[in-house]
Amino acid sequence: MTTQIRQQNGISILELKGKIVGTSVSELREVLLPKVEDSDAPRILIDFENVRMIDSSGLGVLIEAHIVAKRKSGRMGAIHVGKHIKNLIVVHRLVHLFEHFDTEEDAVSALSA
């Protein structure tokens, strides 16, 4: 897995690429959690367009980041969630944890508010 991070209007946009399984789960944790923990009110947008697979450990990292962000009055959103990831989120009843947006522009606008 590789991650590219960029900023737009105070939103940290994480563009993930590859599979989030095994050792790449640790990589995700090392990238995502500091972004959430280092901000007073984190605004994180995760772009799943190039993620082919995520396992339950990867979901655990996302849940952990969401909990920390929520505690700090932050928000996390997701765009380009593929069928496999969407099904996994629904099966584990986690759909309510992440704000879903159709486009990056919609997400940045909503998370900036």
Image (tube, rainbow, N blue to C red):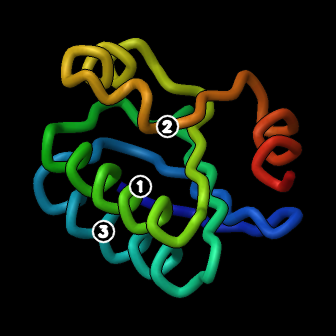
Please indicate whether residue 108 sits to the left or right of residue 68 in the image.
right
Residue at horizontal 57%, vertical 38%?
A: 78
Q: Position of residue 38 (x, y in %)?
A: 53, 87
Position of residue 70 relative to residue 80, above or below, is below
Please indicate whether residue 70 sits to the left or right of residue 102 in the image.
left
Nearer to the camera, 13 or 4: 13
Residue at horizontal 88%, vertical 44%?
A: 109
Position of residue 13 relative to residue 86, above or below, is below
Nearer to the camera, 70 or 85: 70
Mark 3 or 2: in front is: 2
Please indicate whether residue 7 sits to the left or right of residue 47 in the image.
right
**Circle 3: element type:** helix
Q: Inspect the image, locate mark 1, and give the three-letter code of the amino acid beneath it.
A: His
* Label 3 to label 2: alpha-carbon separation: 17 Å
Q: Name the residue under label 1.
A: 66
Mark 3 or 1: in front is: 1
Judge the density around disc 3: few (<14), some (14-19), many (≥20) Cα neighbours within 10 Å.
some
